[in-house]
Amino acid sequence: MGFIINPSRFTVAGWDFEDDFTDSQVTLDARWGQAGTLCKPVATQDDFDWDGERTATNQAMATQPVGAAVSDTAWVLQFKLTNDVLTPGTYSSFFGFGMRSVSQATGAVSGTPDSIMGSISIRSAESNKWHFEGDDGVPWASPQMGANEFSGNPGVASYWYRMIRLTSTTATKKIYSDAYISLIEEKAGVTIASTIVDTDYITFQNDNNGDVTSTFNGRGDDVKFANAVTVAP
């Protein structure tokens, strides 16, 4: 076994990356690069804050769990998100999470990134929604997510998410009501492009497609990533 520099980040149980946000603020800020101020780790809470309100500015945090070596065919990402306030505006706001080929410094509507992302969306004219998709050379939120909509609806509650790249062309997203026991719903074996590659960054990010007034925020915790596997360790 190699030298472990941060026990809260690495484990010997099969996860290549693990963060429970119990380190100092300096350490967390160094680990999770941030754009804007609304999506960030908070050491005093032992978790991270997120804000999904659609703004003209990029609000994001991201980290490289294994450097530039994430498999293009197999990985598992899981984490907990709590929705604190879901008060929509007139138009949709999206909060995205998953793996991207670019860092937090690149906004949702810029560049030509690859990504495998899930999202929560809110809008006053319709129910809150979950989505899941792979994007090949286009931002995950431009155009807004519409494929692979879940039948269930997110509420003000905590949810546990597991995202799996099964092959070069398929991926799965599962949503649980507890720590990976009680499955609410899943999109299994969703078809994605094999050219979605180099998704080296775990990313949590708002949709910066312009300003939409809403109150859409929460907290996150217990981020884990396993590379080159399709079953959680």
Image (tube, helix red, strand yellow):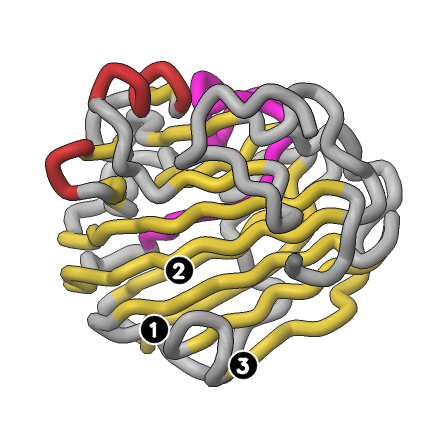
| Label 3 close to label 2 by CB (< 8 Å) | no
Taking depth in this image into account, of 49 and 65 the one nearest to the observer is: 65
* Main SS class of the magenta portion in the image: loop
Label drawn at residue 185: 3
Image check: 155 left or right of 97? Answer: left
> Where does the image place residue 97, in percent across and percent down from the top left?
47, 47
| Label 1 close to label 2 by CB (< 8 Å) | yes
Amino acid type for the residue under numbered disc 2: Ile
> Where does the image place residue 134, in percent across and percent down from the top left?
69, 49
Label drawn at residue 154: 1
Mark 3 or mark 2, which has the lower sequence index?
A: 2
Q: Quadrant of the N terminus?
A: top right
The quadrant where residue 2 appears:
top right
Up-down: is 70 above or below 90?
A: above
Taking depth in this image into account, of 103 and 230 the one nearest to the observer is: 230
In the image, the segment drawn in magenta is 93-113
Mark 1: which secondary structure? Answer: loop
Question: Residue 142, can we see it?
Answer: no
Image check: 2 left or right of 44? Answer: right
Amino acid type for the residue under numbered disc 1: Pro
Mark nearer the viewer, 3 or 1 = 3
Please name the residue that numbered disc 2 is placed on: 120
Q: CA distance from mark 3 to mark 1?
A: 11 Å
Taking depth in this image into account, of 56 and 151 the one nearest to the observer is: 151
Disc 1 crowd rating (10 Å Cα; few below 14, some 14-19, many 20+) is some
